[in-house]
Amino acid sequence: MSNILEMRNITKDFPGVRALDDVSFLVKEGEIHCLVGENGAGKSTLMKILSGVYRKGEYQGDIVLSGEVMNFHGIRDSERMGIGIIHQELALIPELSVYENMYLGHEIKRGSFIDWNETITQSVEFLRKVNLAVEPEEKVKNLGVGKQQLVEIAKALSKDLKLLILDEPTAALNEEESDNLLKLLTELKSHGVTSIMISHKLKEVISIADTVTVLRDGKTICSLSKEKNEINTQVIIKNMVGREISDVFPKRPIKEAGSVALEVKNLNAFNRELGRDIIKDASFRVKKGEVVGIAGLMGAGRTELALSLFGNPLQYVVSGEILIEGKKVSLSSPKSAIEAGLAYVTEDRKGNGLILIQDIKQNITLANLREISKNSIIDANQEINVANEYKQSINIKTPSVEQKVQNLSGGNQQKVSLSKWLFTLPKILILDEPTRGIDVGAKFEIYTIINTLVDEGLSIILISSELPEVMGMSDRIYVMNQGRIAGEVEAKTATAEQIMELATD
Protein backbone atom coordinates (compact mmCIF):
# COMPACT_ATOMS: atom_id res chain seq x y z
CA MET A 1 0.00 0.00 0.00
CA SER A 2 1.16 3.54 -0.76
CA ASN A 3 1.28 6.21 1.94
CA ILE A 4 -1.72 8.52 2.15
CA LEU A 5 -0.17 10.63 4.92
CA GLU A 6 3.25 11.57 6.19
CA MET A 7 3.77 14.03 9.03
CA ARG A 8 7.43 15.02 9.22
CA ASN A 9 9.33 16.49 12.16
CA ILE A 10 6.26 18.01 13.83
CA THR A 11 7.03 20.23 16.83
CA LYS A 12 4.39 22.16 18.78
CA ASP A 13 4.89 24.36 21.85
CA PHE A 14 2.40 25.68 24.38
CA PRO A 15 3.29 28.17 27.14
CA GLY A 16 5.77 26.40 29.41
CA VAL A 17 5.53 23.00 27.72
CA ARG A 18 6.60 21.28 24.47
CA ALA A 19 3.62 19.13 23.46
CA LEU A 20 5.23 17.58 20.36
CA ASP A 21 8.95 17.17 19.80
CA ASP A 22 10.07 16.27 16.25
CA VAL A 23 7.24 13.75 15.75
CA SER A 24 7.05 11.71 12.55
CA PHE A 25 3.87 9.80 11.65
CA LEU A 26 3.26 7.63 8.57
CA VAL A 27 -0.14 6.23 7.51
CA LYS A 28 -0.76 3.82 4.62
CA GLU A 29 -3.74 4.24 2.34
CA GLY A 30 -6.73 2.07 3.27
CA GLU A 31 -5.49 1.01 6.71
CA ILE A 32 -6.85 1.44 10.23
CA HIS A 33 -4.04 3.12 12.13
CA CYS A 34 -4.29 3.42 15.92
CA LEU A 35 -2.46 6.16 17.79
CA VAL A 36 -1.80 5.37 21.44
CA GLY A 37 0.04 6.88 24.37
CA GLU A 38 -0.47 8.11 27.89
CA ASN A 39 -2.54 11.23 28.46
CA GLY A 40 -0.35 14.19 27.63
CA ALA A 41 1.69 12.19 25.10
CA GLY A 42 0.56 14.53 22.30
CA LYS A 43 -1.96 12.38 20.40
CA SER A 44 -4.82 14.87 20.22
CA THR A 45 -2.44 17.76 19.52
CA LEU A 46 -0.97 15.87 16.55
CA MET A 47 -4.44 15.20 15.15
CA LYS A 48 -5.47 18.83 15.64
CA ILE A 49 -2.48 19.84 13.54
CA LEU A 50 -3.45 17.34 10.85
CA SER A 51 -7.06 18.56 10.77
CA GLY A 52 -6.18 22.26 10.64
CA VAL A 53 -7.26 23.21 14.17
CA TYR A 54 -3.69 24.43 14.66
CA ARG A 55 -2.73 26.39 11.56
CA LYS A 56 0.46 26.36 9.56
CA GLY A 57 2.84 28.67 11.40
CA GLU A 58 1.60 27.57 14.84
CA TYR A 59 3.83 24.49 14.63
CA GLN A 60 7.02 23.37 12.87
CA GLY A 61 7.20 20.51 10.38
CA ASP A 62 5.37 19.31 7.28
CA ILE A 63 2.13 17.53 6.45
CA VAL A 64 2.34 15.50 3.23
CA LEU A 65 -0.98 14.19 1.91
CA SER A 66 -0.91 11.83 -1.09
CA GLY A 67 2.57 13.13 -1.94
CA GLU A 68 1.68 16.83 -1.75
CA VAL A 69 2.82 19.20 1.04
CA MET A 70 -0.19 20.79 2.75
CA ASN A 71 -0.48 24.21 4.39
CA PHE A 72 -3.75 24.08 6.30
CA HIS A 73 -4.97 27.42 7.67
CA GLY A 74 -8.14 26.02 9.20
CA ILE A 75 -10.47 23.03 9.37
CA ARG A 76 -12.14 23.93 6.07
CA ASP A 77 -8.81 23.49 4.28
CA SER A 78 -8.36 19.96 5.63
CA GLU A 79 -12.00 19.09 4.88
CA ARG A 80 -11.54 20.13 1.25
CA MET A 81 -8.73 17.56 1.06
CA GLY A 82 -10.99 14.80 2.40
CA ILE A 83 -9.91 14.82 6.06
CA GLY A 84 -12.62 14.55 8.71
CA ILE A 85 -12.07 14.61 12.48
CA ILE A 86 -14.48 13.46 15.18
CA HIS A 87 -13.45 14.85 18.54
CA GLN A 88 -14.01 13.14 21.88
CA GLU A 89 -16.51 15.90 22.73
CA LEU A 90 -19.04 15.65 19.92
CA ALA A 91 -19.63 18.85 17.94
CA LEU A 92 -23.33 18.45 17.15
CA ILE A 93 -26.06 21.01 17.93
CA PRO A 94 -28.68 19.26 20.09
CA GLU A 95 -31.67 21.38 19.03
CA LEU A 96 -31.10 20.84 15.31
CA SER A 97 -32.23 17.77 13.38
CA VAL A 98 -29.92 15.01 12.20
CA TYR A 99 -29.90 16.24 8.59
CA GLU A 100 -29.38 19.88 9.61
CA ASN A 101 -26.35 18.87 11.67
CA MET A 102 -24.97 16.74 8.85
CA TYR A 103 -24.99 19.56 6.30
CA LEU A 104 -24.32 22.52 8.57
CA GLY A 105 -21.53 24.54 6.97
CA HIS A 106 -21.70 22.77 3.60
CA GLU A 107 -25.34 23.17 2.68
CA ILE A 108 -26.77 21.84 -0.57
CA LYS A 109 -28.07 24.82 -2.52
CA ARG A 110 -30.20 25.45 -5.56
CA GLY A 111 -29.29 28.96 -6.61
CA SER A 112 -29.22 31.12 -3.49
CA PHE A 113 -31.50 28.84 -1.47
CA ILE A 114 -30.92 25.64 0.49
CA ASP A 115 -32.42 22.60 -1.22
CA TRP A 116 -33.95 20.90 1.81
CA ASN A 117 -35.46 17.99 -0.13
CA GLU A 118 -32.09 17.05 -1.63
CA THR A 119 -30.45 17.55 1.79
CA ILE A 120 -32.82 15.04 3.38
CA THR A 121 -32.43 12.59 0.47
CA GLN A 122 -28.64 12.64 0.70
CA SER A 123 -28.63 12.45 4.50
CA VAL A 124 -30.72 9.26 4.33
CA GLU A 125 -28.09 7.73 2.02
CA PHE A 126 -25.20 8.54 4.34
CA LEU A 127 -27.12 7.41 7.44
CA ARG A 128 -27.64 4.09 5.65
CA LYS A 129 -23.89 3.84 5.02
CA VAL A 130 -23.20 4.06 8.76
CA ASN A 131 -26.04 1.62 9.57
CA LEU A 132 -27.99 4.20 11.57
CA ALA A 133 -31.75 3.67 11.46
CA VAL A 134 -33.09 7.07 12.52
CA GLU A 135 -35.31 9.58 10.79
CA PRO A 136 -33.26 12.48 9.40
CA GLU A 137 -35.79 14.90 10.94
CA GLU A 138 -35.11 13.56 14.47
CA LYS A 139 -33.52 16.11 16.79
CA VAL A 140 -30.00 15.16 17.83
CA LYS A 141 -30.81 15.74 21.52
CA ASN A 142 -33.14 12.71 21.38
CA LEU A 143 -30.32 10.36 20.34
CA GLY A 144 -27.96 8.48 22.62
CA VAL A 145 -24.22 9.11 22.49
CA GLY A 146 -23.61 6.05 20.30
CA LYS A 147 -26.06 7.24 17.65
CA GLN A 148 -24.71 10.79 17.82
CA GLN A 149 -21.26 9.35 17.11
CA LEU A 150 -22.64 7.72 13.95
CA VAL A 151 -24.24 11.01 12.89
CA GLU A 152 -20.79 12.61 13.15
CA ILE A 153 -19.32 9.89 10.93
CA ALA A 154 -22.17 10.24 8.42
CA LYS A 155 -21.51 14.00 8.39
CA ALA A 156 -17.82 13.36 7.65
CA LEU A 157 -18.70 10.90 4.85
CA SER A 158 -20.95 13.51 3.24
CA LYS A 159 -17.84 15.65 2.62
CA ASP A 160 -16.12 13.20 0.23
CA LEU A 161 -14.08 11.65 3.03
CA LYS A 162 -10.70 10.01 2.40
CA LEU A 163 -9.11 10.10 5.87
CA LEU A 164 -11.20 9.77 9.05
CA ILE A 165 -9.72 10.75 12.43
CA LEU A 166 -11.50 9.54 15.58
CA ASP A 167 -10.40 10.76 19.03
CA GLU A 168 -11.46 8.24 21.70
CA PRO A 169 -14.60 7.27 19.74
CA THR A 170 -15.74 4.53 22.14
CA ALA A 171 -14.95 6.29 25.45
CA ALA A 172 -18.62 7.03 26.20
CA LEU A 173 -20.13 4.00 24.42
CA ASN A 174 -21.33 0.73 25.87
CA GLU A 175 -19.91 -2.57 24.65
CA GLU A 176 -22.51 -3.16 21.94
CA GLU A 177 -22.18 0.39 20.57
CA SER A 178 -18.39 0.07 20.61
CA ASP A 179 -18.52 -3.21 18.68
CA ASN A 180 -20.84 -1.67 16.09
CA LEU A 181 -18.51 1.30 15.63
CA LEU A 182 -15.46 -0.92 15.15
CA LYS A 183 -17.37 -3.01 12.59
CA LEU A 184 -18.26 0.20 10.76
CA LEU A 185 -14.59 1.24 10.57
CA THR A 186 -13.77 -2.15 9.04
CA GLU A 187 -16.62 -1.67 6.55
CA LEU A 188 -15.39 1.83 5.65
CA LYS A 189 -11.91 0.38 5.15
CA SER A 190 -13.32 -2.01 2.54
CA HIS A 191 -14.64 1.07 0.69
CA GLY A 192 -11.23 2.75 0.66
CA VAL A 193 -11.53 5.03 3.70
CA THR A 194 -8.36 5.32 5.80
CA SER A 195 -8.93 5.72 9.55
CA ILE A 196 -6.75 7.05 12.35
CA MET A 197 -8.12 6.14 15.78
CA ILE A 198 -6.90 7.43 19.14
CA SER A 199 -7.86 4.99 21.88
CA HIS A 200 -6.89 3.94 25.39
CA LYS A 201 -8.82 0.68 25.06
CA LEU A 202 -6.02 -1.66 24.10
CA LYS A 203 -8.32 -4.62 23.53
CA GLU A 204 -10.06 -2.61 20.78
CA VAL A 205 -6.75 -1.41 19.39
CA ILE A 206 -5.41 -4.95 19.09
CA SER A 207 -8.62 -6.21 17.49
CA ILE A 208 -8.84 -3.58 14.75
CA ALA A 209 -5.46 -1.93 14.07
CA ASP A 210 -3.34 -2.67 11.01
CA THR A 211 -0.65 -0.41 12.48
CA VAL A 212 -0.16 1.06 15.96
CA THR A 213 2.00 4.14 16.56
CA VAL A 214 3.04 4.91 20.14
CA LEU A 215 3.73 8.44 21.38
CA ARG A 216 5.38 9.19 24.72
CA ASP A 217 6.18 12.62 26.14
CA GLY A 218 5.59 14.26 22.76
CA LYS A 219 7.91 11.92 20.83
CA THR A 220 7.35 9.05 18.40
CA ILE A 221 8.47 5.88 20.18
CA CYS A 222 7.63 3.16 17.64
CA SER A 223 5.20 1.88 15.02
CA LEU A 224 3.97 -1.71 15.28
CA SER A 225 2.56 -3.77 12.41
CA LYS A 226 -0.14 -6.43 12.51
CA GLU A 227 1.32 -7.90 9.31
CA LYS A 228 4.62 -8.48 11.16
CA ASN A 229 2.78 -9.81 14.24
CA GLU A 230 4.21 -6.99 16.40
CA ILE A 231 0.99 -5.83 18.09
CA ASN A 232 0.26 -7.14 21.59
CA THR A 233 -0.78 -5.64 24.91
CA GLN A 234 2.52 -5.91 26.79
CA VAL A 235 4.58 -4.42 23.95
CA ILE A 236 2.18 -1.49 23.58
CA ILE A 237 2.07 -0.78 27.34
CA LYS A 238 5.84 -1.04 27.72
CA ASN A 239 6.35 1.50 24.92
CA MET A 240 3.58 3.78 26.20
CA VAL A 241 4.84 4.09 29.77
CA GLY A 242 8.53 3.24 29.34
CA ARG A 243 8.23 0.34 31.74
CA GLU A 244 6.31 -2.90 32.17
CA ILE A 245 3.15 -2.88 34.26
CA SER A 246 2.85 -6.40 35.58
CA ASP A 247 -0.25 -5.86 37.73
CA VAL A 248 -3.01 -3.85 36.07
CA PHE A 249 -4.70 -3.46 39.46
CA PRO A 250 -2.27 -2.74 42.33
CA LYS A 251 -2.70 -5.09 45.25
CA ARG A 252 -4.25 -3.81 48.47
CA PRO A 253 -3.32 -5.32 51.83
CA ILE A 254 -6.12 -7.60 53.02
CA LYS A 255 -7.76 -6.30 56.17
CA GLU A 256 -11.18 -6.53 57.73
CA ALA A 257 -13.57 -3.74 56.74
CA GLY A 258 -14.88 -1.63 59.60
CA SER A 259 -18.38 -0.73 60.72
CA VAL A 260 -21.10 0.33 58.28
CA ALA A 261 -20.41 3.84 56.97
CA LEU A 262 -23.41 4.14 54.65
CA GLU A 263 -26.66 2.23 54.54
CA VAL A 264 -29.37 2.81 51.95
CA LYS A 265 -32.83 1.31 52.45
CA ASN A 266 -35.53 1.07 49.79
CA LEU A 267 -34.35 4.06 47.78
CA ASN A 268 -36.67 5.11 44.97
CA ALA A 269 -36.23 7.95 42.48
CA PHE A 270 -38.84 9.23 40.03
CA ASN A 271 -37.74 11.32 37.04
CA ARG A 272 -40.50 13.84 36.28
CA GLU A 273 -39.13 14.59 32.81
CA LEU A 274 -39.18 10.92 31.77
CA GLY A 275 -42.35 10.21 33.74
CA ARG A 276 -41.00 7.00 35.28
CA ASP A 277 -39.05 5.50 38.16
CA ILE A 278 -35.33 5.39 37.51
CA ILE A 279 -34.35 3.83 40.87
CA LYS A 280 -36.56 1.12 42.36
CA ASP A 281 -36.27 -0.11 45.96
CA ALA A 282 -32.47 0.00 46.05
CA SER A 283 -30.91 -1.20 49.30
CA PHE A 284 -27.19 -1.60 49.98
CA ARG A 285 -24.46 -0.83 52.50
CA VAL A 286 -20.85 0.31 52.43
CA LYS A 287 -18.39 -0.33 55.28
CA LYS A 288 -15.49 1.83 56.39
CA GLY A 289 -12.30 1.04 54.49
CA GLU A 290 -14.14 -0.81 51.72
CA VAL A 291 -14.55 -0.40 47.96
CA VAL A 292 -18.05 -1.28 46.82
CA GLY A 293 -18.45 -1.59 43.05
CA ILE A 294 -21.64 -0.73 41.18
CA ALA A 295 -21.83 -2.61 37.88
CA GLY A 296 -24.49 -2.65 35.17
CA LEU A 297 -25.18 -1.68 31.58
CA MET A 298 -25.60 1.91 30.43
CA GLY A 299 -29.07 3.08 31.44
CA ALA A 300 -29.22 0.71 34.41
CA GLY A 301 -29.42 3.67 36.83
CA ARG A 302 -25.92 3.71 38.33
CA THR A 303 -25.28 7.45 37.92
CA GLU A 304 -28.88 8.21 38.91
CA LEU A 305 -28.32 6.24 42.12
CA ALA A 306 -25.18 8.25 42.86
CA LEU A 307 -26.92 11.57 42.21
CA SER A 308 -29.87 10.56 44.39
CA LEU A 309 -27.41 10.03 47.24
CA PHE A 310 -25.41 13.18 46.56
CA GLY A 311 -28.14 15.67 47.39
CA ASN A 312 -30.34 14.98 44.36
CA PRO A 313 -29.15 17.91 42.16
CA LEU A 314 -31.45 16.92 39.28
CA GLN A 315 -34.49 17.09 41.58
CA TYR A 316 -35.83 13.56 41.21
CA VAL A 317 -38.72 12.64 43.51
CA VAL A 318 -36.76 10.56 46.03
CA SER A 319 -37.98 8.33 48.85
CA GLY A 320 -36.31 5.81 51.16
CA GLU A 321 -33.83 5.96 54.03
CA ILE A 322 -30.17 6.95 54.04
CA LEU A 323 -28.08 6.32 57.14
CA ILE A 324 -24.51 7.55 57.64
CA GLU A 325 -22.67 5.87 60.52
CA GLY A 326 -26.02 4.63 61.80
CA LYS A 327 -27.75 8.02 61.81
CA LYS A 328 -30.61 8.80 59.45
CA VAL A 329 -29.83 11.84 57.28
CA SER A 330 -31.78 14.03 54.89
CA LEU A 331 -29.68 14.78 51.82
CA SER A 332 -31.82 17.42 50.13
CA SER A 333 -28.98 19.23 48.34
CA PRO A 334 -25.33 18.66 47.40
CA LYS A 335 -24.44 21.08 50.22
CA SER A 336 -26.19 18.88 52.79
CA ALA A 337 -24.54 15.78 51.28
CA ILE A 338 -21.08 17.37 51.57
CA GLU A 339 -21.78 18.38 55.17
CA ALA A 340 -22.83 14.78 55.91
CA GLY A 341 -19.49 13.52 54.58
CA LEU A 342 -20.29 12.51 50.99
CA ALA A 343 -18.31 13.47 47.89
CA TYR A 344 -19.07 12.71 44.24
CA VAL A 345 -16.50 12.65 41.42
CA THR A 346 -18.63 12.96 38.29
CA GLU A 347 -18.27 10.82 35.16
CA ASP A 348 -18.15 14.03 33.08
CA ARG A 349 -15.13 15.87 34.43
CA LYS A 350 -15.10 18.50 31.66
CA GLY A 351 -18.82 19.24 31.67
CA ASN A 352 -19.66 18.98 35.37
CA GLY A 353 -16.51 18.33 37.38
CA LEU A 354 -14.16 21.18 36.54
CA ILE A 355 -14.15 24.82 35.46
CA LEU A 356 -11.74 24.45 32.57
CA ILE A 357 -10.91 28.13 32.12
CA GLN A 358 -9.86 28.44 35.77
CA ASP A 359 -6.55 27.26 37.14
CA ILE A 360 -5.71 24.18 39.19
CA LYS A 361 -5.70 25.88 42.59
CA GLN A 362 -9.13 27.44 42.01
CA ASN A 363 -10.62 24.08 41.01
CA ILE A 364 -9.10 22.13 43.90
CA THR A 365 -10.43 24.51 46.56
CA LEU A 366 -13.81 25.16 44.90
CA ALA A 367 -15.92 22.80 47.04
CA ASN A 368 -14.46 23.99 50.35
CA LEU A 369 -13.74 27.71 50.03
CA ARG A 370 -14.59 28.30 53.68
CA GLU A 371 -11.48 26.36 54.66
CA ILE A 372 -9.16 28.81 52.88
CA SER A 373 -11.06 32.02 53.65
CA LYS A 374 -10.83 34.63 56.38
CA ASN A 375 -13.80 36.97 56.85
CA SER A 376 -15.24 35.65 53.56
CA ILE A 377 -12.08 36.60 51.65
CA ILE A 378 -9.95 33.87 50.06
CA ASP A 379 -6.42 33.65 51.43
CA ALA A 380 -4.42 33.40 48.18
CA ASN A 381 -1.33 31.95 49.86
CA GLN A 382 -3.34 29.26 51.62
CA GLU A 383 -5.09 28.44 48.34
CA ILE A 384 -1.72 27.90 46.66
CA ASN A 385 -0.41 25.84 49.60
CA VAL A 386 -3.44 23.53 49.57
CA ALA A 387 -3.21 23.03 45.81
CA ASN A 388 0.52 22.29 46.02
CA GLU A 389 -0.12 19.67 48.73
CA TYR A 390 -2.49 17.79 46.41
CA LYS A 391 -0.22 18.35 43.41
CA GLN A 392 2.51 16.52 45.32
CA SER A 393 0.44 13.89 47.14
CA ILE A 394 -1.42 12.55 44.09
CA ASN A 395 1.18 13.52 41.48
CA ILE A 396 -0.58 16.11 39.32
CA LYS A 397 1.89 16.62 36.49
CA THR A 398 2.08 20.36 35.91
CA PRO A 399 4.75 23.04 36.23
CA SER A 400 2.45 25.20 38.39
CA VAL A 401 -0.91 25.07 40.19
CA GLU A 402 -1.67 28.33 38.37
CA GLN A 403 -1.85 26.40 35.08
CA LYS A 404 -5.35 26.43 33.54
CA VAL A 405 -7.10 23.08 33.87
CA GLN A 406 -8.03 23.07 30.16
CA ASN A 407 -4.31 22.73 29.34
CA LEU A 408 -3.91 19.50 31.35
CA SER A 409 -4.14 15.95 30.03
CA GLY A 410 -7.24 13.92 30.85
CA GLY A 411 -5.47 11.96 33.58
CA ASN A 412 -4.25 15.10 35.31
CA GLN A 413 -7.67 16.73 34.97
CA GLN A 414 -9.14 13.70 36.73
CA LYS A 415 -6.61 14.07 39.54
CA VAL A 416 -7.66 17.71 39.97
CA SER A 417 -11.33 16.66 40.08
CA LEU A 418 -10.49 14.03 42.69
CA SER A 419 -8.42 16.50 44.72
CA LYS A 420 -11.34 18.94 44.81
CA TRP A 421 -13.47 16.40 46.63
CA LEU A 422 -10.70 15.04 48.84
CA PHE A 423 -10.25 18.60 50.13
CA THR A 424 -13.78 18.38 51.60
CA LEU A 425 -12.47 15.52 53.82
CA PRO A 426 -15.27 13.08 52.97
CA LYS A 427 -16.17 9.86 54.77
CA ILE A 428 -17.75 8.33 51.67
CA LEU A 429 -16.38 8.97 48.18
CA ILE A 430 -18.45 8.14 45.09
CA LEU A 431 -16.32 7.66 41.96
CA ASP A 432 -18.36 7.61 38.75
CA GLU A 433 -16.30 6.18 35.84
CA PRO A 434 -13.05 7.45 37.42
CA THR A 435 -10.77 6.19 34.62
CA ARG A 436 -12.89 7.00 31.56
CA GLY A 437 -10.68 8.32 28.76
CA ILE A 438 -7.49 7.78 30.77
CA ASP A 439 -4.44 5.83 29.64
CA VAL A 440 -3.07 2.73 31.38
CA GLY A 441 -0.35 4.58 33.29
CA ALA A 442 -2.77 7.18 34.69
CA LYS A 443 -5.27 4.41 35.50
CA PHE A 444 -2.66 2.64 37.60
CA GLU A 445 -2.04 5.90 39.48
CA ILE A 446 -5.77 6.39 40.14
CA TYR A 447 -6.05 2.79 41.38
CA THR A 448 -3.09 3.33 43.70
CA ILE A 449 -4.74 6.49 45.08
CA ILE A 450 -7.97 4.53 45.68
CA ASN A 451 -6.06 1.87 47.62
CA THR A 452 -4.31 4.51 49.73
CA LEU A 453 -7.62 6.23 50.57
CA VAL A 454 -9.26 2.95 51.54
CA ASP A 455 -6.26 2.04 53.69
CA GLU A 456 -6.81 5.35 55.51
CA GLY A 457 -10.39 4.32 56.30
CA LEU A 458 -12.33 6.06 53.52
CA SER A 459 -15.36 4.26 52.08
CA ILE A 460 -15.55 4.23 48.29
CA ILE A 461 -18.41 3.53 45.89
CA LEU A 462 -16.91 2.71 42.48
CA ILE A 463 -19.17 2.96 39.43
CA SER A 464 -17.56 1.57 36.30
CA SER A 465 -18.62 0.24 32.90
CA GLU A 466 -15.36 -1.71 32.65
CA LEU A 467 -15.93 -5.12 34.23
CA PRO A 468 -12.23 -5.90 34.79
CA GLU A 469 -11.92 -2.60 36.68
CA VAL A 470 -14.93 -3.07 38.93
CA MET A 471 -13.90 -6.69 39.61
CA GLY A 472 -10.22 -5.86 40.14
CA MET A 473 -10.71 -2.90 42.49
CA SER A 474 -13.81 -3.77 44.54
CA ASP A 475 -14.35 -5.81 47.69
CA ARG A 476 -18.04 -6.37 46.94
CA ILE A 477 -20.10 -5.60 43.83
CA TYR A 478 -23.76 -4.66 43.49
CA VAL A 479 -25.18 -5.20 40.00
CA MET A 480 -27.90 -2.87 38.72
CA ASN A 481 -30.49 -3.71 36.09
CA GLN A 482 -33.21 -1.27 34.97
CA GLY A 483 -33.05 0.80 38.15
CA ARG A 484 -32.99 -2.15 40.54
CA ILE A 485 -30.15 -3.81 42.41
CA ALA A 486 -30.31 -7.23 40.80
CA GLY A 487 -27.76 -8.89 43.07
CA GLU A 488 -24.62 -8.70 45.18
CA VAL A 489 -21.42 -10.67 44.56
CA GLU A 490 -18.04 -10.96 46.27
CA ALA A 491 -15.44 -9.48 43.95
CA LYS A 492 -12.78 -12.13 44.66
CA THR A 493 -15.08 -14.97 43.56
CA ALA A 494 -17.22 -13.17 40.95
CA THR A 495 -16.99 -13.90 37.24
CA ALA A 496 -17.76 -11.58 34.34
CA GLU A 497 -20.43 -14.02 33.18
CA GLN A 498 -22.12 -13.94 36.59
CA ILE A 499 -22.21 -10.14 36.62
CA MET A 500 -23.48 -9.89 33.03
CA GLU A 501 -26.21 -12.41 33.77
CA LEU A 502 -27.46 -10.23 36.63
CA ALA A 503 -27.14 -7.10 34.49
CA THR A 504 -29.12 -8.49 31.55
CA ASP A 505 -31.77 -10.79 33.05
Image (cartoon, helix red, strand yellow):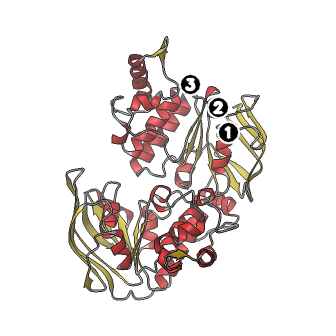
Residue shown at the point (44%, 60%) measured from the top left: 347
Numbered disc 3: secondary structure: loop
Residue 356 % position (x, y): 55, 57
User: What number is the disc on residue 50?
Assistant: 1
Q: Is residue 505 left or right of residue 361?
A: left
Task: Give amino acid for label 3.
Answer: Asp
Q: Between residues 496 and 94, which one lies in front from this camera angle?
A: 94
Dot 1 surroundings within 10 Å: few (below 14), some, or many (20 or more)?
many
Q: Is residue 494 visible?
A: no
Quadrant in the picture for residue 97: top left
Asked if the residue under mark 2 is in contact with the one under mark 1, i.e. CB atoms within 8 Å, the reply is yes
Q: Is residue 31 left or right of residue 311?
A: right
Residue 25 % position (x, y): 72, 43
Task: Give amino acid for label 2.
Answer: Ser
Reading the image, the residue beneath label 3 is 160
Quadrant in the picture for residue 87: top right
Q: Which of the two discs, 1 and 2, labels the residue nearer the N terminus?
A: 1
User: What number is the disc on residue 499?
Assistant: none
Task: Give amino acid for label 1.
Answer: Leu
Residue 131 % position (x, y): 40, 33
User: What number is the disc on residue 78?
Assistant: 2
Residue shown at the point (48%, 49%) measured from the top left: 170
Q: Between residues 499 and 165, which one lies in front from this camera angle?
A: 165
